[in-house]
Amino acid sequence: MVFDSGSNIHLLTLKDARRLFSEHKTSNLKVIGVSHVPVVAPAEGQLCLSVQDTMGRPYNLDLGKAFAMKDVPMNLISVQLNFKAWFYRSF
């Protein structure tokens, strides 16, 4: 997964979405990437990750709504969405 400061959505490959989404729904969201050609992201769901800290303690992170497409070269995690979620949770 790559943290992307230019993305305003979390975008995963369909293969990884099947494994990481806690809920799966059909989506019609059109994603406009660097080619400026809209492409439909056919799936969406709740992106939940299980991580461990350096002491081995497990944590579950709910990163919210994410989308999935077939021809995504890598999974993109939106820095913008994470910053907003973590900032507003701290108050």
Image: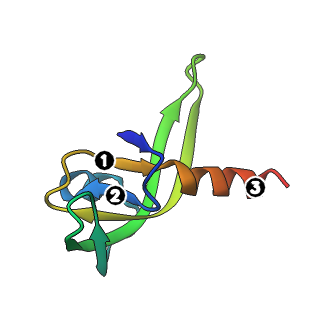
Q: Position of residue 2 (x, y in %)?
A: 37, 39
Q: Is residue 57 left or right of residue 42?
A: right
Whether the residues at callouts 1 and 2 have beta carbons within 8 Å, the answer is yes
Read off the residue under disc 3: 89
**Mark 1 belongs to which amino acid?**
Asn
> Which circle, 3 or 2, is nearer the viewer?
2
Around disc 1, counting alpha carbons within 10 Å, would you say few (fewer than 14), some (14 to 19), or many (20 or more)?
Answer: some
Q: Earlier in the sequence, mark 1 or mark 3?
A: 1
Judging depth in this view, the residue of 38 and 82 nearest the camera is 38
Residue sitting nearer the eye, 33 or 65? 33
| Residue type highlighted by circle 2 | Leu
Q: Which amino acid is tagged 3?
A: Arg
> Hey, which residue is sitting farthest top in the picture?
55
**Foreground: 21 or 2?**
2
The tag on residue 75 is 1
Q: Residues within 10 Å of mark 2 (few under 14, many from 20)?
A: many
The residues tagged by marks 1 and 3 sit, at their Cα atoms, a distance apart of 25 Å
Residue at the spot x=63%, y=50% of the render?
83
- State if disc 2 and disc 3 touch (CB < 8 Å): no
The dot on residue 11 is 2
Considering the numbered disc 3 on the image, is that residue within a helix, a strand or a loop?
A: helix
Lower position in the chain sequence, tag 1 or tag 2? 2
Quadrant in which the N terminus is drawn: top left
Residue at 55% in and 47% down: 61
Question: Is the C terminus in the top left, top right, bottom left or bottom right quadrant?
Answer: bottom right
* Residue plotted at (57% across, 24% down): 53
Could you tell me which secondary element the residue under label 1 belongs to? Answer: loop
Residue 55 on image: x %, y %: 60, 17
Query: Where residue 35 appears, x then y in whole percent?
Result: 20, 61
